[in-house]
Amino acid sequence: MEVVIGKTTLSLIQGDITQEDTDAIVNAANSRLAGGAGVDGAIHRAGGPSIMEECRKIGGCPTGQAVITTGGNLKARWVIHTVGPVYQGGGKGEAGLLASAYRESLKLASSRKLKSIAFPAISTGVYSYPLAEAARIALKTTIDYLRDHSDLELVRFVLFDSRTYDVFVEELKKLL
């Protein structure tokens, strides 16, 4: 599914984020930037050791923030590592932290003059964020950002399975 927000194409696809050829892909990282399971592990495996070398030099990333490294062996030139919140029932500021993870990733892409970025569904795996709420936050934050910033040409959400893709499509329809 594709829509245009201002001058930017917002795209939802089902696929493998490690295969994206956007300028940057976003990694749903942990705060130690230590690699891990899910999309984090997949990106480090596909990108090779240069990504981890840069992550070690950076040292860490607080929840809701973002940092950037090389893309290593990936098609994408850059990896933006952001840390989404672990879901603890919704009363511990998780929604604000998740929105911040998306917003800070977009701001970092803009500051580097990148034209395209691909996101996974941050915090919806081992961090247990409810999928529909996470999709709504991700899409609303992205749309709000794109309405105020026209520098990005493509923002793509690369969703790992059909259930996640379907939920993102439904949430996008509600927001439009």
Image (cartoon, rainbow, N blue to C red):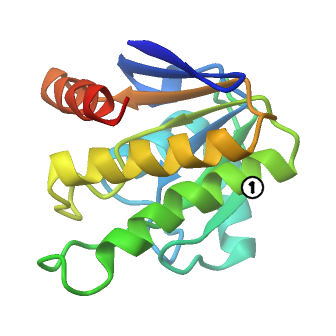
Q: Is residue 9 left or right of residue 30?
A: right
**In the picture shown, does residue 83 fall above or below 46?**
below
**In the picture shown, does residue 63 fall above or below 81?**
below
Q: Is residue 110 left or right of residue 89?
A: right
Q: Nearer the viewer, residue 118 or 140?
A: 140
Q: Quadrant of residue 105?
A: bottom right
Residue at (78, 29) in percent of width and height:
115
Q: Is residue 87 left or right of residue 4?
A: left
- Determine the secondary structure under disc 1: helix
Q: Nearer the viewer, residue 148 or 47?
A: 148
Considering the image in quadrants, where does the N terminus appear? top left
Residue 57 placement (x, y as % from top left): 75, 73
Name the residue tied to disc 1: 108
Q: Amino acid at mark 1?
A: Leu
Residue 164 placement (x, y as % from top left): 20, 32
Residue 159 placement (x, y as % from top left): 32, 29
Q: Nearer the viewer, residue 84 or 170?
A: 170
**How many other residues sit within 10 Å of disc 1, few (<14), some (14-19) or many (≥20)?**
some
Residue found at the very far bottom of the displayed protein: 92
Residue at (71, 46) in percent of width and height:
148
Residue at (20, 72) in percent of width and height:
87
Residue found at the very far top of the displayed protein: 1
Q: How many marks?
A: 1
Considering the image in quadrants, where does the C terminus appear? top left
Residue 25 placement (x, y as % from top left): 59, 37
**In the picture shown, does residue 10 fall above or below 136?**
above
